[in-house]
């Protein structure tokens, strides 16, 4: 805070003891002038005091504003590209309908034409009892919101699921934990999916908010889900079980592809196979569509399943 200007030497505001009146007009005018001069000096002193107080208060306010701005910049820097904060709500923030509609309507032909050079993992065969829910084959997803690998796979999974049904309650926009890639993605927590062919059961086990040496708990797998998860992984993420016939335990493409890219930019590239992001997500979605056709939907709808083939 800047120092206040040098305080003026204060003079008393008390009137001096009047001299005996002489009855001469000149003396009266002189006394009147002296009194007016004393009042003006007192007013000037009071004005300077008020100005000094305002300067001091203004300095304090300015200091507070500067600190607030620095904190905001620091927090924003920690959030990384495309992140508004270090954490996000468990259900995420709403995604614009234009974006979800665009992601859901990528032509199957575009998925088929996507180059597969970036694919590094695919579902593998398992021999479990038939996994069902509500009388239908079940697609079980176990992930975590902090997880960068889950963040990577959810994009392709959303595109693939959209070929067989609809999200009546859309996923929200989140990002993986700041210290785990800070990858923009969507969360299946609190989403609702409907398909005439199968059910989709998502379990997001934690948020992206740090809690001690781990993260804040969110959803707990049932005993049956936990048994499947531990039977095929060491409780790693993501785990996608296709009705007990196929399982995926990794992201299909490299998460580094999405690091430093904004949510909007990723969504924009989906369906554009001339970009690395678009090609990797589209090719991954094609593989997932093939897996769903062969294990969950009975190769329906025919137009979709016949177009992608058997892989």
Image (tube, helix red, strand yellow):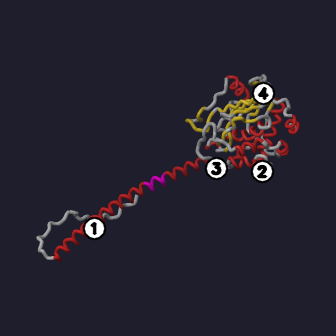
Residue 174 appears in which quarter of the rendering?
top right
Give the mark nearest the N terminus, 3 or 2: 3
Which residue corresponds to mark 1? 40
**Dot 4: within a 10 Å radius of its alpha carbon, few (fewer than 14), some, or many (20 or more) residues?**
many
User: What's the distance in space between the residues labelled 1 and 3, CA to CA?
Assistant: 61 Å
Q: Nearer the viewer, mark 1 or mark 4?
A: 1
Front position in the image: 273 or 25: 25
**Dot 2: within a 10 Å radius of its alpha carbon, few (fewer than 14), some, or many (20 or more) residues?**
few
Q: Position of residue 299 (x, y in %)?
A: 86, 32
Residue 54 covered by magenta stretch: no
Give the mark nearest the N terminus, 2 or 4: 4
Which residue corresponds to mark 4? 243
Front position in the image: 186 or 44: 44
* Secondary structure mainly formed by the magenta segment: helix
Q: Position of residue 93 (x, y in %)?
A: 63, 41
Tag 4's secondary structure?
Answer: loop
Which residue corresponds to mark 2? 275
User: What's the distance in space between the residues labelled 3 and 2, CA to CA?
Assistant: 19 Å
Give the mark nearest the N terminus, 1 or 4: 1
Tag 1's secondary structure?
Answer: helix
Give the mark nearest the N terminus, 3 or 4: 3
Residues shaded magenta: 61-67
Name the residue located 38 percent from the left edge and 58 percent from the top edge.
54
The quadrant of the picture occupied by the C terminus is: top right
Give the mark nearest the N terminus, 1 or 2: 1
Task: Indicate left or right for 261 with 69 as reference.
Answer: right
Give the mark nearest the N terminus, 1 or 3: 1
């Amino acid at each position: 805070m800047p120092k206040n200007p040098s305080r003026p030497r204060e003079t008393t505001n008390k009137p001096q003891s009047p001299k005996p009146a002489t009855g001469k007009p000149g003396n009266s005018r002189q006394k009147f002038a002296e009194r007016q001069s004393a009042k003006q000096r007192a007013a000037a002193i009071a004005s300077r005091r008020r100005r000094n107080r305002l300067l001091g208060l203004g300095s304090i306010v300015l200091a507070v504003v500067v600190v607030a701005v620095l904190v905001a910049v620091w927090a924003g820097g920690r959030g990384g590209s495309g992140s508004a904060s270090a954490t996000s709500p468990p259900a995420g923030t709403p995604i614009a309908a234009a974006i979800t509609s665009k992601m859901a309507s990528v032509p199957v032909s575009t998925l088929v034409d996507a180059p597969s050079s970036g694919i590094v993992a695919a579902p593998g065969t398992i021999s479990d009892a038939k996994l069902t829910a509500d009388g239908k084959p079940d697609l079980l997803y176990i992930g975590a919101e902090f997880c960068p690998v889950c963040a990577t796979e959810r994009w392709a999974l959303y595109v693939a699921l959209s070929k067989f049904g609809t999200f009546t309650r859309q996923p929200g926009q989140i990002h993986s934990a700041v210290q785990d890639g800070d990858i923009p993605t969507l969360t299946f927590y609190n989403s609702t999916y409907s398909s005439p062919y199968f059910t989709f059961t998502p379990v997001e086990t934690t948020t992206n908010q740090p809690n001690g040496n781990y993260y804040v708990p969110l959803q707990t797998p049932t005993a049956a889900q936990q048994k499947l998860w531990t039977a095929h992984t060491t409780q790693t993420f993501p785990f996608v079980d296709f009705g007990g016939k196929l399982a995926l335990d990794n992201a299909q493409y490299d998460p580094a592809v999405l690091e430093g890219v904004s949510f909007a930019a990723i969504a924009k590239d989906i369906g554009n196979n001339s970009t690395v992001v678009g090609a990797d997500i589209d090719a991954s979605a094609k593989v997932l569509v093939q897996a769903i056709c062969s294990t969950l939907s009975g190769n329906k709808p025919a137009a979709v399943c016949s177009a992608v083939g058997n892989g």
